[in-house]
């Protein structure tokens, strides 16, 4: 059994690796085997900006799950969060690789959003398992819709980027379904609106900074 101190050290290490390291995916990138399209400079910048937003979202997901798991005393819930975090780590690596292929960069604001998401996760975890799971389910629902918006804005010729986003979207839907199967509680409408507003701030700034 890990002590609280052991867990905190482990989570701190994970945070450093998320922000400063290069997490390696356990699954191959969905872009593997998909031919690279001949994109002009504008299309490459556009795709890189979209993937920068997605990468920032995955940084936030790692922090959010960390906070939720640290604040929860439910071992089954912590295992579900750990599984989702592992899949989100794949997304983090896939996004970073695609950004590099497009000659883009990750957001300079990642540390700020990481800290905020960690704090939100800790608060959600302290509200009890049903609300914790409800927050997870709603987050994944919003991310799934957000990714659909990116697919709608992405040029049809950029199949490599599209393959990555579609795979991420499928995983997010699975995470939401898992949370509901574990007893997620529906969040009040005002809370959902606040979450959407915060997400718009994050996505709007990380697309450019």
Image: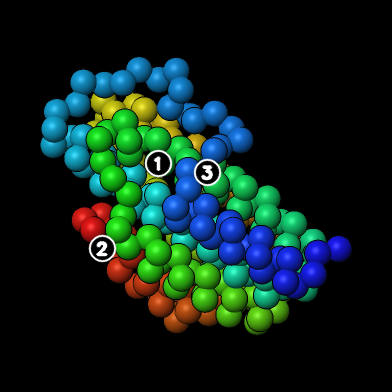
Q: Closer to us: mark 3 or mark 1? A: 3
Label located before the other in sequence (3 or 1): 3
Q: Residues within 10 Å of mark 2 (few under 14, many from 20)?
A: few
Residue that appears at 29% across and 28% down: 158
Using the image as rendered, state which of residue 118 and residue 47 is in the foreground.
Answer: 118
Q: CA distance from mark 2 to mark 1?
A: 18 Å
* Mark 1 residue element: helix
Which mark is drawn over residue 96? Answer: 1
Label disc, if present, on residue 205 of the rendered structure? 2
Q: Which mark is residue 76?
A: none
Q: Nearer the viewer, residue 155 or 27?
A: 27
* Sequence-first disc among 2 and 1: 1
Viewer-closest of 99 and 1: 1
Q: Is residue 4 above or below residue 163?
A: below
Residue 104 shown left or right of residue 33 in the figure: left
Percent across and percent down for residue 80 are 71, 56
Up/down of 9 relative to 172, above or below: below
Q: Secondary structure at mark 2?
A: helix
Residues packed near mark 3 inside 10 Å, few (<14), some (14 to 19) or many (20 plus): some
Q: Nearer the viewer, mark 2 or mark 3?
A: 3
Name the spot of residue 162 as percent of width and height, x first.
37, 33
Snapshot colouring:
rainbow
According to the picture, the residue beneath numbered tag 3 turns out to be 23
Q: Residue at x 71, y 66 (%)?
A: 7
């Amino acid at each position: 059994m890990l002590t609280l101190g052991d867990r905190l050290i482990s989570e701190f290490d994970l945070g450093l690796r998320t922000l400063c390291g290069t997490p390696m995916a356990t699954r191959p990138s969905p872009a593997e085997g998909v031919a690279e399209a001949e994109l002009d400079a504008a299309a490459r910048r556009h795709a890189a900006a979209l993937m920068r937003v997605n990468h920032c979202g995955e940084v936030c997901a790692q922090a959010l799950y960390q906070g939720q798991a640290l604040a929860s005393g439910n071992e089954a819930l912590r295992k579900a969060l750990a599984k989702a975090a592992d899949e989100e780590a794949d997304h983090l690596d896939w996004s970073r690789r695609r950004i590099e292929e497009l000659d883009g960069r990750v957001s300079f604001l990642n540390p700020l959003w990481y800290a905020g998401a960690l704090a939100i996760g800790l608060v959600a975890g302290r509200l009890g398992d049903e609300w914790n799971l409800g927050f997870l389910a709603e987050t994944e629902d919003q991310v799934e819709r957000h990714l659909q918006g990116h697919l709608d804005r992405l040029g049809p010729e950029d199949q490599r980027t599209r393959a990555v986003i579609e795979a991420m979207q499928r995983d997010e839907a699975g995470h939401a379904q898992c949370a509901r199967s574990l007893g997620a509680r529906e969040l009040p409408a005002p809370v959902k609106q606040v979450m959407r507003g915060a997400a718009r701030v994050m996505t709007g700034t990380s697309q450019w900074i």
